[in-house]
Amino acid sequence: MNILKYFLGTGFYSGLIPKAPGTTGSLAVLLIIFWIIYAQIYLLLFVILIGSCLISLWVAPYFEEEFGEDPGKMVIDEWAGQSLTFISISFTSDLKSGLIILIAGFILFRFFDILKPLGINKLQKYKGGFGILGDDLLAGLYALICLKTLIFTWPNLFGMV
């Protein structure tokens, strides 16, 4: 069972990169997110969000016991936050604008996840899975709000006109 928890918690081993595992985990799920949005299978994005949240809560006690508080190699929480960033985003048929939106959402999520402004750092202080997951979900929510605002205010930049 611990092998399965390790496999899922590391985001299918994407969190095992020694430098910046959270960024690597976010990039791994970004490839999946891009395909889902481009194929317009939005329900699957919701499934990944809910699934990664549930998995995160399930594997967190194992990871904290084995690797310490909020271990970097556990990136399934990044999968949840990165998924939330794109939960109501759609692409046009233009591949270039889709990539611009994807990169902007990734940068915004990593900004909020790394710097933890606006109360995100307070959520991380909770023990266990809720602390590990909560800060990433709030970072994803802030990134979603910013991304939607950017798309609305500068639609030409994102090829939405």
Image (cartoon, rainbow, N blue to C red):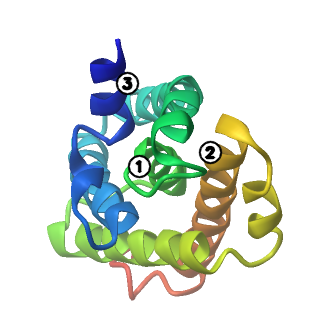
| Amino acid type of the residue that numbered disc 1 sits on in the rendered structure | Val
Mark 3 or mark 1: which is in front?
3
Q: Quadrant of the C terminus?
A: bottom left
Disc 2 target residue: 133
Spatial CA span between label 1 and label 2: 10 Å
User: What secondary structure is found at the residue carrying circle 2?
Assistant: helix
Left or right side of 46 for 102: left
Count neighbours of disc 3 (C-alpha within 10 A) and say few if under 14, some if 14 to 19, many if 20 or more.
many
- The disc placed on residue 75 is 1
| Amino acid type of the residue that numbered disc 2 sits on in the rendered structure | Leu
Disc 3 target residue: 5
Left or right side of 24 for 153: right
Q: Earlier in the sequence, mark 3 or mark 1?
A: 3
- The disc placed on residue 17 is none
| Amino acid type of the residue that numbered disc 3 sits on in the rendered structure | Lys
Mark 2 or mark 3: which is in front?
3
Left or right side of 111 for 18: left
Question: Looking at the image, is 133 positioned above or below residue 34?
Answer: above
- Residue depicted at 33% across the width and 62% down the height: 21
- Residue 57: x and y in percent read 59, 29
